[in-house]
Image: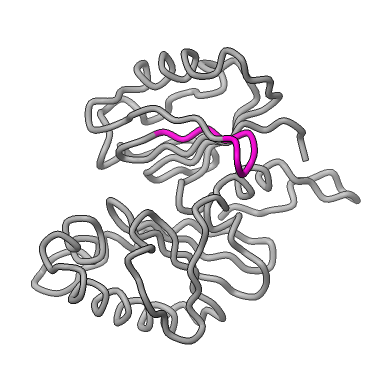
Amino acid sequence: MKRNVLVVDIGGTQVKLLMSVRDKLKFDSGPEMTPRDFVKKFHETTPDLKFAAVSIGFPSVVREGKIVKEPKHLSKGWIGFNFGRALKKPTRVINDAAMQALGSHVRGRMLFLGLGTGLGAALVWNNNLMPLELGDLPYRGHRKIEDWLGKDGLEELGEKAWRKEVIYCVTQLKLSFVADTVVLGGGNVKKMARLPRGVKRGDNRNAFLGGCRLWETDRRTGQPRWRIL
């Protein structure tokens, strides 16, 4: 694993920068933030930090370390953006929910669901990490599942009805993905009072561990320990 990894968690409202589980800096993001805005704020926020590499969790589809779809809750211009060149450090980019999933995994086949602005998801098993786009699945009333489980659904349904919807969906998705465990993360997981058996409350600080794990290598082969599908 590379030492002194700076983990950057880009969200729809904030960008969090972590050098450890406890040491966190942040700045605002939002629907107007372009890549240029991000780079400017990044350099303004990190002049005193010493780091050798950067891990970035990004809220959209990432394939082979490259953004291939514009994010829903940021501005445009992110597809193909070269973070390593802009930040002048070795950089690895992954979907933000996948980074949290990687840090949350302990054993077995684990489905991670992030309850935030939208619905993030990833599946982890046997050193394999598969980012998922479950938020776009069709659901009740010809709407997408994240319309019900995300921020808009919470505001529309109210907390009590929203919690019931979350438990129903989580139970069905656990069966569909044959998961041993479901970990719920994201900013709104704190609104979940009780969870079904086999469903655990995640810790948003696991994004830091996930970002560090991106740099882990196999001691025998020197190849990356985690296979990102």
- Quadrant in the rendering for residue 60: top left
- Indicate whether 153 appears above or below 116: below
Report whether 151 appears left or right of 129: left
Report whether 166 appears left or right of 16: left
- Please state which of residues 155 and 123 is positioned toward the viewer in this rendering: 155
223 magenta-colored? no
Report whether 73 appears left or right of 216: left
Image quadrant in which the C terminus is located: bottom right
Image quadrant in which the N terminus is located: top right
Which residue is at a point 54% across and 77% down the rendered structure image? 181
Which residue is at a point 44% across and 30% down the rendered structure image? 26
21 magenta-colored? yes
- Quadrant in the rendering for residue 156: bottom left
Report whether 28 appears left or right of 142: right
Work out which residue is located at the far right of the displayed protein and give it.
Answer: 220
Which residue is at a point 48% across and 86% down the rendered structure image? 197
Residues in magenta, as a range: 15-23
Which residue is at a point 58% across and 60% down the rendered structure image? 104
Residue 140: percent from left, percent from top: 14, 74
Residue 115: percent from left, percent from top: 35, 60
Residue 138: percent from left, percent from top: 20, 68
- Please state which of residues 10 and 200 is positioned toward the viewer in this rendering: 200
